[in-house]
Image: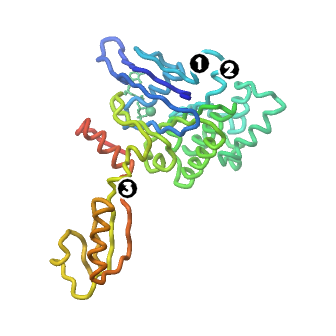
């Protein structure tokens, strides 16, 4: 079942005499219940605009955007969606705990359950040590964590996270990744924008790649990164007397060890059979999967060769 859907979604920003800016150009995506969906694209691709339209914070120029098949204007639907904004602006003079109390009230958590819920969330996002510190004194990663706690306050079915990993150190990123996994195990759907592609590759079931408002790729990671055309790196200890010339293919050959990259497993097997029969010993066989980062750069560059990519 689709819990989030856009159909031909288009957003054109136009202010006065300024040139119109096409932020979304006919975007159609569907996110299924229970999946972790990565929404990727370089700066200005239209990711935040999509989330804002889904949440009815912006109106589309044309097309449709639906969440949980219901009108988001109704309170029950809103209560089933959690949102963590990209650049959260929280009340700086509140402590983390006071901030969550405020959100608990906004989310109608009954007063006798608030403390327990807040304690649980603070624990979940690893902010116990800073619960009584004011938000103005938080680091960027700490603001991200408290923002995530806020998004989960009312136990939402669908969680929209706009760059949840930015500003976190490697340990923090691992913790948030584990948390996103745990949310999925609890049956929630997670839709998130990210630039940190290695993390996306680890946790997403499916991804969409967007550039200049257009959808360029959509699919599961195995579909997009391919499984059959995988290259394989092989490393062999060659028999005495092997010369560079006798190898017949390109590679590194030092101290009797030959390292090379073959286009697929078939080629690798042929090469290994040939050399093992001459006394070579296999030291390593490493499948080379294309990384999501390579695919991302390749896809965006094919569309727009001049784009500056920072991932
Ligand atoms: N309120 C606005 N008025 C005019 N243009 C806007 C407005 N909001 C966004 N845009 C433009 O729309 C495009 C898409 O912006 P958006 O914030 O959705 O990108 P993004 O994919 O979230 O980028 P980032 O990775 O930098 O967060 C950009 O070119 C941006 O300049
Ligand atoms: Mg954004």
Identified at 24% across, 77% down, the residue is 253
Element under label 3?
Answer: loop
Q: Residue at x 69, y 33 (%)?
A: 155
Regarding residue 255, the answer to whether it shows in the image is no
Residue at the far left in the pictured view: 245
Determine whether, in the image, residue 216 is placed left or right of residue 178: left
Q: Which is in the foreground here, disc 2 or disc 3?
A: 3
Residue 10 position by quadrant: top left
Residue 166 is situated, as x and y percent measured from the top left of the image, at: 49, 43
The quarter of the image that holds ligand 2 is top left
Compared across the picture, whether 164 is left or right of 82 comes to left
For the residues labelled 2 and 1, say whether their Cβ atoms are less than 8 Å apart.
Answer: yes
Separation of residues labelled 2 and 1 (CA atoms): 10 Å
Q: Earlier in the sequence, mark 2 or mark 3?
A: 2
Residue shown at 59% from the left, 33% from the top: 159
Quarter of the image for residue 112 reads top right
Image height of 100 relative to 231, above or below? above
Say whether residue 265 is visible: yes
Q: Position of residue 34 (x, y in %)?
A: 58, 37
Q: Earlier in the sequence, mark 1 or mark 3?
A: 1
Which residue is at a point 61% across and 41% down the rendered structure image?
Answer: 184
Above or below, comparing residue 57 to residue 124 in the picture: above
Q: Quick check: is the Cβ at mark 3 less than 8 Å away from ligand 1?
A: no
The extreme bottom residue here reads 240
Q: Position of residue 108 (x, y in %)?
A: 74, 24
In three-dimensional space, the C-alpha distance between marks 1 and 3, rounded to whole angstroms, equals 40 Å
List the residue tagged with mark 2.
Answer: 76
The residue that label 3 is drawn on is 289
Q: Which residue is mark 1?
A: 70
């Amino acid at each position: 079942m689709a819990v989030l859907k856009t159909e031909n979604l288009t957003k054109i920003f136009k202010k006065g005499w300024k040139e119109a800016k096409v932020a979304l150009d006919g975007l159609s995506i569907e996110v299924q219940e229970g999946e972790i969906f990565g929404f990727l694209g370089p700066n200005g691709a239209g990711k935040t605009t999509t989330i804002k339209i889904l949440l009815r914070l912006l109106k589309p120029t044309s097309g449709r955007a639906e969440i949980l098949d219901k009108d988001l204007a109704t309170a029950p639907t809103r209560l089933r969606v959690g949102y963590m904004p990209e650049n959260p602006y929280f009340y700086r003079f509140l402590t983390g705990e006071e901030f969550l109390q405020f959100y608990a009230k906004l989310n109608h958590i009954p007063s006798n359950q608030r403390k327990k819920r807040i304690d649980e969330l603070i624990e979940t996002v690893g902010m116990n040590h800073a619960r009584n510190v004011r938000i103005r004194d938080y680091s960027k990663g700490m603001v991200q964590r408290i923002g995530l706690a806020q998004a989960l306050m009312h136990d939402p079915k669908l969680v929209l996270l706009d760059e949840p990993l930015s500003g976190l150190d490697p340990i923090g990123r691992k913790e948030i990744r584990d948390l996103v996994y745990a949310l999925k195990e609890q049956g929630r759907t997670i839709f998130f924008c990210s630039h940190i592609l290695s993390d996306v590759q680890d946790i997403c079931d499916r991804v969409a790649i967007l550039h200049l408002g257009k959808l360029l790729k959509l699919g599961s990671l195995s579909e997009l990164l391919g499984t059959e055309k995988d290259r394989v790196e092989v490393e062999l200890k060659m028999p005495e007397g092997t010369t560079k010339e006798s190898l017949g293919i390109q590679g590194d050959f030092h101290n009797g060890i030959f390292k090379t990259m073959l286009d697929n497993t078939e080629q690798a097997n042929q090469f290994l059979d040939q050399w093992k029969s001459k006394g070579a010993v296999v030291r390593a066989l490493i499948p080379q999967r294309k990384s999501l980062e390579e695919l991302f750069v390749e896809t965006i560059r094919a569309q727009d060769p001049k784009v500056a990519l920072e991932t």
